[in-house]
Amino acid sequence: MLTFFPTPYSGEWWYSVLCRYHLRSGNAKFQTTIRELFEGGPRAMIGAFFPNNTIYQLVSQLPESFDFKSLILEHTPYQYYMRMYPLSQKRAFLEALCKEEATAPTYIWKTAGGKNQPLRYCPLCAHEEVKVYGESYWHTLHQLPLVTACVHHCRLLDASSEALKLNEGFYMVPTGSWKTDSVAMDSPEVLLAKISREYLVTDIEVCPTQKHIL
Ligand SMILES: [Zn+2]
């Protein structure tokens, strides 16, 4: 059992919670934290965008207030990628994930963001979070493949010049650069960000057509 673990913020990606744990742990090496979190080997797929068995392994070390399904629904892109599936299939797949029996569909891990692209953040969100919480965090929404702007009407920034090896380390949102590039409120970029957000956060029971509720 871990002696502490950060409470996820609203819209925070699961990987980001692990990054904040690493920062607070005071561990000098990434591998020390990975061993602490996953009780064993020096490797774990912590940077996978679609939920995987690292959540399952970790939740077993956390207090009961950390609910596995809520973590998947609220802190991973599960709902975004499963939105078009029939409700029965979404629920069945969620149950399978909870029993560590499911793996991500191939088309998702081949096309999903995260490890294939630099992490993205909104400077306005980050600035606000530092003022309110004293730290900023990675948003699931900002890592979705087609999202390039925040609902703040501001273009997202890449956190690094190239994709980082997320499975090997914990990286925090850069601080100190709040330079913003505004995007017109009615631009396709902002519209796409808003639609993507709906796909991500709308209740699991909401499906595109009545036919999907089977
Ligand atoms: Zn923002």
Image (tube, helix red, strand yellow):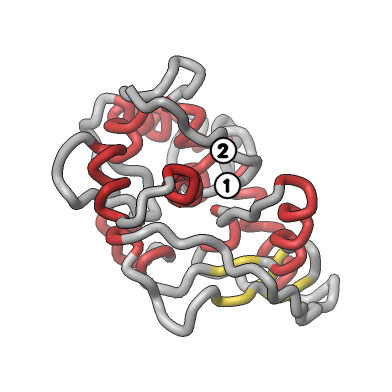
Total residue callouts: 2
Q: Position of residue 2 (x, y in %)?
A: 36, 27
Graded by Cα atoms within 10 Å as few (under 14), some (14 to 19) or many (20 or more), the crowding at tag 1 reads many
Q: Position of residue 166 (x, y in %)?
A: 35, 62
Residue that label 2 marks: 8
Snapshot quadrant of residue 163: bottom left
Where disc 2 sits, the SS reads: loop
What is the residue that sits farthest to the top in this orientation? 64
Say which quadrant the N terminus sits in.
top left
Vertically, is 189 above or below 56?
below
Residue at the (56%, 38%) spot, across then down: 8
What is the residue that sits farthest to the right in this orientation? 185
Q: Are marks 2 and 1 in contact (CB under 8 Å)?
A: yes
- The residue closer to the viewer here, 188 or 165, is 165
Residue 107 seen by the camera: no
- The residue closer to the viewer here, 174 or 15, is 174
Residue at the (76%, 72%) spot, across then down: 154
Q: Amino acid at mark 1?
A: Glu
Vertically, is 13 above or below 101?
below
Residue that label 1 marks: 12
Vertically, is 210 above or below 107?
above
Residue at the (45%, 36%) spot, across then down: 72
Q: Position of residue 169 (x, y in %)?
A: 34, 60
Vertically, is 158 above or below 100?
below
Residue 208 seen by the camera: yes
What is the residue that sits farthest to the left in this orientation? 41
* Cα separation between marks 2 and 1: 6 Å
Snapshot quadrant of residue 192: bottom right
Residue at the (84%, 77%) spot, across then down: 184
Name the side, left or right, on which 14 lies relative to 165: right
Q: Amino acid at mark 2?
A: Pro
Q: Is mark 1 within 8 Å of ligand 1?
A: no
